[in-house]
Amino acid sequence: MISDFEAVRENLFPASHGAIEDWSKFRWHRDRTNQIQAYKAHSSQAIAIDVFGTLKMSRDRDRIFDAIAECVGVARGGPWAVILEWTDTDRLLGEPRPTQVDALAVGSAAALVIECKFTEPAGQCSQTAASRSGERQCSGNYQDQINPGNGVRSRCALTGKRIRYWEYIPKIFELDPGADYTPCPFKGDAYQWMRNAVLAAAIGKHRNLQAAALAAFADHPSFPTARKVKRGLVDPSLAGQGAITPISYQQIIAIACHVGRDRALWNELSAWIDHKIARAASRKLDFQEVRNGC
């Protein structure tokens, strides 16, 4: 019988394995039964490790991250350190459960906060979700209101919990924290991208570095993030369109092929990712056809 870690290893590009120092202590994505999910063909964590784990272990790492930094508009300069499943242990945003990002790359002059997507959409704000009693902590609008869960009055339920997103949002997105917005600009899936943008700003301020938030995604028309990129990750009416930069796994590997010295490695990774994307897209199409009764 194949073990959990053996199944995960088989689903990860071989050159990325060394990026996981302790497989038993690594922050694996798990389901409600505590089962590791990275063995699945459509696992976003697995494809993130494929790409950024391989970059972490590569002798081309500094050259490639310098090129990525230049591409997204921040300063070059290594050495670059890459941390998979990085958590904000400094609690820069005052979150009770600190944000965990798929990868953090830090150079001598800049930091890259990297959120990775595959077949899934971006996450939405939990404050607008109905509780078992039917109550919602936030109406979905950014306006003066009382959170029925804790009785705190604020425009944003998260601000009422002393979470500091709106300390950074006004500058990044050119929004007035004292104005009302109906609905809240971050009610939908722009919420996750906002979180990464403000985290990048907080890291840059804390470490005195330039910083950028990246949305790494699989570029295929079947996947929601790829489709969203074409329309804009946040509301096009907002400023701060460059607050989070989309970059596909295919683009990253193309950069690696262009500036890296180990062409054979990057060609192998390219084929691996292309195959994984095609397989996940095929399974998604099969599921849709079954659901639609085709």
Image (cartoon, grey):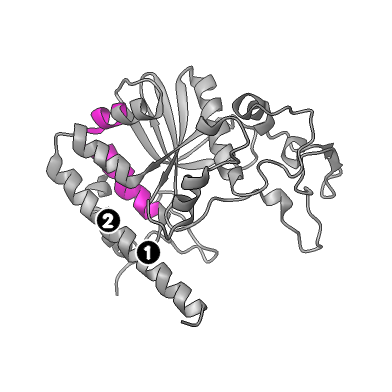
Q: For residue 46, say whether it is visible.
A: yes
Tag 1 or tag 2, which sits nearer the N-term? Answer: 2
Q: Residues within 10 Å of mark 2 (few under 14, many from 20)?
A: some
Residue at mark 2 to residue at mark 1: CA–CA distance:
11 Å
Tag 2 near tag 1, CB within 8 Å: no
Residue 249 sits inside the magenta stretch: no
Q: Where residue 193 sits: x, y (%)? A: 55, 41
Q: For residue 19, say whether it is visible.
A: no
Position of 13 with respect to 263 (left or right) is: right
**Which label belongs to residue 249?**
none
Residue plotted at (27% across, 56% down): 274
Q: What element carries label 1?
A: helix
**Most common secondary structure along the magenta stretch:** helix
Q: Residues within 10 Å of mark 1 (few under 14, many from 20)?
A: many
Q: Where residue 10 sits: x, y (%)? A: 26, 61
User: Mark 2 is on which residue type?
Assistant: Asp
Closer to the camera in the image, 292 or 136:
292
- Give the labeled residue for mark 1: 281
Range of residues picked out in magenta: 45-66
- Give the labeled residue for mark 2: 274
Q: Quadrant of residue 21?
A: top left
User: On the rendered image, what quadrant is the N terminus found in?
Assistant: bottom left
Position of 235 with respect to 147 (left or right) is: left
Closer to the camera in the image, 153 or 89:
153
Q: Which residue lies furthest to the bottom in this view?
A: 293
Position of 138 with respect to 43 (left or right) is: right
Residue plotted at (77% across, 43% down): 182
